[in-house]
Image (cartoon, rainbow, N blue to C red):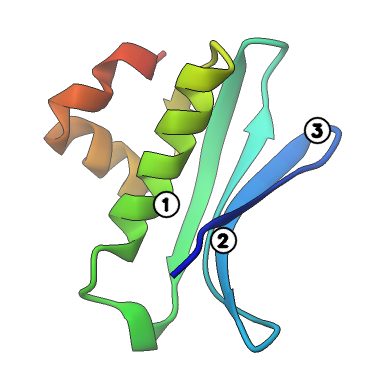
Amino acid sequence: MEIKHQNFETKGRFFIEYQSKVLAEMTYSNAGKDRIIIDHTEVNESLQGRGVGYKLVGEAVAHARKNNLKIIPLCPFANAVFKKKSEFKDVLQ
């Protein structure tokens, strides 16, 4: 399953699409030039239990590292992932 990324002027998202239907999505808002705020994560029931939410957060972390960004995880799911994954702490705001 390929995770796609769209970045708009003030917002963005990481998502998984199948047959033109979004099955998983994590959205964020840009907070200045060096931070993003993860505000929502949603995974379709058909993909639950497969670690898809973790993969979406992992893509955001990779994006943050590549672009020298910090992440503020306001989304409860993303916040829980950051608490469990110490290897992601380098991008945590």
Label 2 packing within 10 angstroms: few (<14), some (14-19), many (20+):
many
Query: Would you name the residue on which mark 3 appears?
Result: 10
Please tell me which residue lies in front, 24 or 83. Answer: 24
Residue 92 lies left or right of residue 5; in this view the side is left
Disc 2, disc 1: CB below 8 Å? Answer: yes
Closer to viewer: mark 1 or mark 3: 1
Query: The disc labelled 1 sits on which kind of residue?
Result: Leu
Query: The disc labelled 2 sits on which kind of residue?
Result: Phe
**At which x and y percent is residue 70?**
49, 15
Q: CA distance from mark 1 to mark 3?
A: 19 Å
Disc 2, disc 3: CB below 8 Å? Answer: no
Answer with the quarter of the image where residue 20 lies. bottom right
Query: Would you name the residue on which mark 1 appears?
Result: 56
Query: Would you name the residue on which mark 2 appears?
Result: 15
Q: CA distance from mark 2 to mark 3?
A: 17 Å
**At which x and y percent is residue 82?**
25, 33
Circle 1 sits in a helix, a strand or a loop, which is it?
helix
Answer with the quarter of the image where residue 67 lies. top right
Q: Which mark is residue 30?
A: none
**Lower sequence index among marks 2 and 1:** 2
Query: The disc labelled 3 sits on which kind of residue?
Result: Thr
Disc 1, disc 3: CB below 8 Å? Answer: no
Query: From the image, which quarter does the C terminus lie in?
Result: top left
